[in-house]
Structure formats: structure tokens, C-alpha cells
């Protein structure tokens, strides 16, 4: 089956006039892609997941508004209905924003692209009463692995070691193989100057 330029143009016109259907197709494709990636132990980076969700939500809202306009002969009435329909959504977001912000604060784990032992990783930081960093395989700016390759224990505290590199006194790295079995461990003790900046380190294997 050959897909010509005219067919592509026809499909694009159909999706343009049926944004809601296009949004549902977009969601379905992303679910399928995520499932396939999961089977090979790969996932999207956090920023990509957030972007996909935002696009899906915005597309859904715009699609609903478009359907209201298409189903009504009175454009003014359709505009009023659309506006009235959007108000509860805005009020709900505003009402739940403090809760969403709290949940984000408690469960948001920032991701960083970093290099450890001359190998590039995606590092996910978890810090509340103690600081832990899980290092995953790096597959470019869009994708990362799902299996922990290295676990870093930075000790007590509530900080991000990538934005506060001089904060830790030591860190213990635990390395894992493809089956999640521990293969190696080392501890790095940091030596700091009078200003608290790390100047060197001692390694205990």
C-alpha cells in the first residue's frame, strides 16, 4: 500500500477537523510505544512524559471545544457553552493546585544527565531525610533505562547532590548487573577546604 502526498494531506485535514479523534490516536500511540519500550527495559525521560501528558490534556480540551462548535449552528451560543465548560476545569485546577504542589514536592524526583566512572547515566535523585541517587542507562535526551545500574547513598540530608555538589561528606556506590544482582561497592570520602568546597577524595573499595 503506497501512501501518497494527497493521502497524507487528506489525513492531516481530517485530524485538523477532528482534533479530539487525533488526540485519542495520539494517546493510543503513546500507550503502545510505552508498552513496547517497557518490554525492552526502556522508558521516556520524565520531562518527555510530562510533555506528552500536557499535550494530551490540551488536545482533549481543544477537541471538546471544537466538537461543540461543529455541532452547533449558533457560534455565539457555542462560544458561551465552551466558556462555561472551561470554568469548572480552571476552578478545579486552582482548587487542587496546593494539593498537587504538595504531592509534587513529596514525590517529584529530579532527573539529571551525568557521568560516573566515565559512563553516561540518567541519575534520579530522591531526598527527604536522606539522599539517594539511582543511576540508569542513558539512551539520549529522550529515553532512559528502567533498571538501576548504580545506587548512590549520599547519607542524611535533604538536597540534590547535582545542584549542591559540595554538600555530601561521603557517598557509597553500589553497582548491579543486568539481573539486579550486586556486583561491586565502593565508598568515596570527600576532603573539603575551609570554605566547604570538595578538593579531593579517598576511595574505599
Image (cartoon, rainbow, N blue to C red):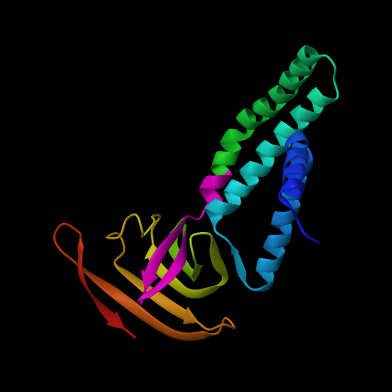
Which residue shows up at 15% across the image and 63% down it?
193
Q: Is residue 104 covered in magenta? A: yes
> Image quadrant of residue 143?
bottom right
Residue 131 point in image, percent of width and height: 42, 62
Residue placed most toward the observer, 181 or 56:
56
34 up-or-down from 80: above or below: below
155 up-or-down from 20: above or below: below
Does the rendering let one see residue 133?
A: no
Q: Quadrant of the C terminus?
A: bottom left
> Is residue 103 toward the left or the right of residue 23 in the image?
left
Residue placed most toward the observer, 185 or 70:
70
> Is residue 59 toward the left or the right of residue 166 in the image?
right
Which residue shows up at 37% across the image and 73% down it?
116
Which residue shows up at 73% across the image and 55% down it?
29
Q: Which residues are magenta?
A: 103-125
> Image quadrant of residue 145?
bottom right
Residue 124 point in image, percent of width and height: 48, 62
Residue 98 point in image, percent of width and height: 57, 35
Residue placed most toward the observer, 189 or 6:
6
Q: Quadrant of the N terminus?
A: bottom right
12 up-or-down from 180: above or below: above
Residue placed most toward the observer, 6 or 84:
6
Does the rendering let one see residue 41?
A: yes
Which residue shows up at 30% across the image and 60% down it?
165
Amino acid at each position: 500500500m503506497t501512501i501518497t502526498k494527497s493521502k497524507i494531506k487528506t489525513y492531516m485535514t481530517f485530524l485538523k477537523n477532528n482534533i479530539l479523534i487525533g488526540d485519542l490516536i495520539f494517546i493510543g500511540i503513546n500507550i503502545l510505544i510505552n508498552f513496547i519500550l517497557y518490554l525492552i527495559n526502556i522508558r521516556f525521560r520524565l520531562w518527555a512524559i510530562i510533555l506528552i501528558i500536557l499535550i494530551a490534556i490540551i488536545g482533549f480540551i481543544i477537541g471538546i471545544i471544537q466538537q461543540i462548535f461543529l455541532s452547533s449552528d449558533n457560534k455565539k451560543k457555542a462560544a458561551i457553552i465552551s466558556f462555561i465548560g472551561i470554568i469548572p476545569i480552571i476552578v478545579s485546577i486552582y482548587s487542587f493546585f496546593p494539593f498537587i504542589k504538595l504531592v509534587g514536592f513529596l514525590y517529584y524526583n529530579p532527573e539529571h544527565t551525568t557521568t560516573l566512572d566515565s559512563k553516561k547515566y540518567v541519575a534520579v535523585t530522591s531526598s527527604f531525610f536522606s539522599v539517594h541517587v539511582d543511576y540508569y542507562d542513558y539512551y539520549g535526551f529522550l529515553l532512559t533505562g528502567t533498571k538501576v545500574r548504580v545506587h548512590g547513598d549520599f547519607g542524611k540530608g535533604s538536597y540534590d547532590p547535582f545542584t549542591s555538589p559540595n554538600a555530601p561528606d561521603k557517598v557509597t556506590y553500589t553497582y548491579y548487573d543486568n539481573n539486579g544482582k550486586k556486583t561491586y561497592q565502593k565508598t568515596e570520602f570527600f576532603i573539603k577546604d575551609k570554605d566547604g568546597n570538595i578538593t579531593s577524595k579517598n576511595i574505599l573499595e
